[in-house]
Image (cartoon, rainbow, N blue to C red):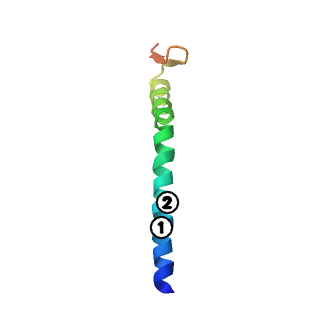
Amino acid sequence: MAAFGVGMENKILIILLILGLIYFSFNYKNWVQFWEVDKCLDAGGRWNYENNYCEKS
């Protein structure tokens, strides 16, 4: 019985890892844009969402 529990934990861990990688791959573009916007605002610029670039003042 103990071996079954360990195997099941490993399967759950692998499934969670795969689901996490799928989630990351679908949201990677949003995270990259978020950090670009944040970097622009921190530098005192203004983010142009229509043209997707930083307007430095």
Q: Which is more toward the observer, 35 or 1?
A: 1
Q: Residue furthest right?
A: 50
What secondary structure is found at the residue carrying circle 1?
A: helix
| In this view, 43 is above or below 30 | above
Count the labels in the image.
2
**Amino acid, disc 2:** Ile
Measured from the top left, where is residue 39 in percent x and y? 45, 29
| In this view, 53 is above or below 11 | above
Residue 52 marker: none
| In this view, 8 is above or below 45 | below
Question: Which residue bears the numbered disc 2?
Answer: 15
Q: Which is more toward the observer, 41 or 37?
A: 37
Q: Are marks 1 and 2 in contact (CB under 8 Å)?
A: yes
Measured from the top left, where is residue 51 in percent x and y? 50, 14
Callout 1 environment at 10 Å: few (<14), some (14 to 19), or many (20+)? few
Distance from label 1 to label 2 (Cα)?
A: 6 Å
Measured from the top left, where is residue 32 in percent x and y? 45, 33
Q: Which is more toward the observer, 43 or 28?
A: 28
Q: Which is more toward the observer, 54 or 8?
A: 8
Measured from the top left, where is residue 36 in percent x and y? 45, 28
| In this view, 14 is above or below 37 | below
Callout 2 environment at 10 Å: few (<14), some (14 to 19), or many (20+)? few
What secondary structure is found at the residue carrying circle 2?
A: helix
Q: Residue furthest bottom?
A: 1
Question: Which residue bears the numbered disc 1?
Answer: 11
Q: Residue drawn at (50%, 25%), measured in percent from left and top? A: 41
**Amino acid, disc 1:** Lys
Q: Residue drawn at (44%, 24%), measured in percent from left and top? A: 43
Q: Residue drawn at (46%, 54%), measured in percent from left and top? A: 18
